[in-house]
Amino acid sequence: MKYSADMSVTPDLQAVYSKWENKGPGRIQPDTNTQKILQDGRQKWRDRYEDEIKPQTRRSSYKQKAIPTENVSYNVITQFKTMPTITADSFVTTRPLMGRCCSCVPYSQKDFSASTQNHGINNILNVTSGVRPKGFLDRRFKKLAYTFRRNTSHRYNDILMLVLTAPRVSEAVKMKTEKVTSTKRKEKIEKNPAEILKVMKASISNRLLKITAWVLLKILSVMLNGVHVHKNQMVVIKKASQRGIPMIYLPLHLSHLDYILVTFILWNYDIKAPFVAAGDNLNIPVFNLILRGLGGFFIRRKLDKVAGKKDTIYRAVLHTYMQEILKSGEDLEFFIEGGRTRSGRAYHPKGGLLSVVMDTLHDGLIEDAYMVPISINYEKILDGNYCNEEMGLPKKQESFWGVVKGVVKVLSGNYGSVRVDFSHPFSLKEYIQRNSNTSMMSDDDLPDTPSPTGIRNDTDTASPTGISNAPDTPSPNGISKAGSCSSLYGTDIVIEDQRQSIESVAEHVLYYSVQSQSLMCTNLVAFLLLTKYREGTTVKQLIRDIDWLKGELRFRKRDVGFVGDTSEVLEYVLELLTENLVIKIDTNIKPCTELPQIFELSYYANPVLSVFLLESVLACSVIFHCDIDMSSVTTQREDVTANREDILTTAQSLCKLLKYDFIFCPPCKRLEEELADALDELVTSEILKVHEDDYGCGDPHQKWARNLSATVSWDDDEENEAFNEQLLKVNAHRSDCFNKLLFLYTVLAPILESYYLTALHISRDLAMELPEDSFIHILHTHAKKRVEKKLASFAESAALSTIKNAVKGFEDSNIVNVYYAGNIRMMELRDHYTVWNKLNYYLDLLESLRN
């Protein structure tokens, strides 16, 4: 018998069923109820399986005749037999989608956090993925064909004349000319804005964007394994960019490649290139033309040429230029940290350029702005290490030949992969309205249905920005005009609420940039070597700990930028880090902890600190209050207790001191609540236990329930007070729990040693005033000598960037007073008895945490 293409090995059994049901004249017919039950059963079967499979019927013992096979169709049985039980989808790894909007902006969260099925990773450099070549050129010149067949042309408005004729610039020139009498001097001042703008301006070229994209595809494919982005994140960015509202891209700054990397990725998704703020140190021949064509505009690293004397014309031109960019509907990109990080940790945010965006929104010149935190991470540093700068040597200035040598060096090496994460955009207007210090909006004040921007825009009660401008009512965003022609942040802001609002937005952006950063394999290995295995370990043990750390990251919803077998990943990391940083002898691995190599290794390890940050602060507080001697932790197994409230209070003090190294929680949340939740997690994980006296004796099997109940808070004030006075005990008799506590302590221990040395020198050297540079030099020299003499517990405590942050921390704590004497920054210890009490408190705290 011949079978057609749609035939199956399974026949249509309907004819057989009918024949056997009617066969036999003496067959007893079922009664009415039985027939009804059978009919209902068959109908339910058909409703569930349709006609693909039939229920079995009683068959005769007679020999069956040939079964007709006409009209054979596929059914469930054949699908089961022919379809594989394991498909390609079975191997898909679902990655956590990081960078979702914070709950403090619910309408942005609802608008941009819609889930999609696309949770995969896209390698931008793999331009042929999923694309079938159309001809010889596509097969032979894949990247060239991909680049020039993309229709990515966008229009960019010319705003130069608008800047030069702006009232802000004219007022600044007028103020400056009134102070001089010479005609030539006045003419020079009047030409100054045009000269400034000539050096500053960008000139985006669609043709240059295409050429640069092709060059980058060729070059990056040589020195990198891939540039990876999350597909879902790019879908959201594409959606937001089509609304005509300015996008403000705010990436972390790790490398000079960052300037063009974000633009390159956006170009691949046909998203308009932003104007990028670049330091004037990159305004070097040839390369400045390329950067201008890609959207770069150059600004001074120090806005004022003379310290303490404001260059009002330059400030006015820069402020107006950025405002006109936003008014014309263009996008902006700038680095909120100000410069590249030297330590691997994000710098404390600077609000100068951000203040221009907020002023533009306040003035009603734009409807809204979408803030996009971006995190970038490299498996290997592209710009070389920063060991010399951490050792105190001056930074090398960029030059044409220096850039050429750097490019040649990069092309001859393997730098692994790059991961770029775009957090979901959030409305600046919504954030300001909901988080203003002067006017917090209630849920009743917000619309029931979000607009495309997610913010109410009632014409009767709000300005075009959606912010009330009534004269008797302060602006809900807490910003009032400073009334200056040169109002960039940190210069003319006379209203504290304005400063706090800018700082709040800046810290919010930086916090979520850090928290959405994917961690690379080099980060994990360096972190484990410096926290757990400074004296070395075996390959097998390190592999097990890498898997453990990946599980910890997954539990905290953090993503990693690598896949594969852990043993192969470790071999790959050892190739990238080289023997200068990690020494492998047979099956043993040991980190290099000598100066200056330790600075580079800690650079790779520091991005992981944000994962355990709050827990580490609490662990240090527990060790301080339980008086655990860190020099004899291997033999100490005594039961020690501490008051819950004391632990939280000390942890808050540490967070305040370390504010220039870390942002512990977003400004929209309360630090004390975040610390309390983290402390409850330590109790739940049995690192800490609630003291038995708080609950009395009980069944040992109820320990877990007691720990869980300890995390429950009560509304009654008296019960809350009793909860805060609860005694917590270190679970010292369980080695795994005690070792976890020591691990959490080690996370921050090198940084705390730097702060201890700083506090020690403040108490000794600042009895008399000193220039800030001299004090830092004395402190840094002493820190390096301690490492050379093997007196330091952690060699990375001598890093110059950490020492500078420590000085800022004690200044912010009102222990040190900093002022200008001419052009010199001077330091002195504040003369008040409370200052000495606070300084001695920090000295006792930090000294107790020394290893």
Image (cartoon, grey):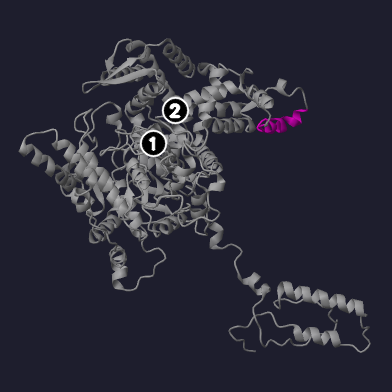
Q: Crowding near pointer 2: few (<14 within 10 Å), some, many (20+)? A: some
Range covered by the magenta-colored residues: 699-713
- Residue 442 included in the magenta stretch of the image: no
Element type at mark 2: loop
Query: For residue 734, which quarter of the picture?
Result: top right
Q: Position of residue 802 (x, y in %)?
A: 36, 27
Q: Closer to the N terminus: mark 2 or mark 1? A: 1
> Which residue was labeled with disc 1?
498
Left or right: where 6 falls relative to 180: right
Q: Which label sits on residue 534? A: 2
**Residue type at mark 2?**
Arg
Verify whether residue 708 appears in magenta: yes
Question: Where 683 falls versus 68 (above or below)?
Answer: above
Name the image quarter holding the N terminus. Answer: bottom right
Q: CA distance from mark 2 to mark 1?
A: 46 Å
Q: Is residue 508 above or below residue 260?
A: above
- What secondary structure is the magenta-colored segment mainly? helix
Q: Nearer the viewer, residue 485 or 302?
A: 485
| Dot 1 alpha-carbon crowd within 10 angstroms: few under 14, some 14 to 19, many 20 or more | many
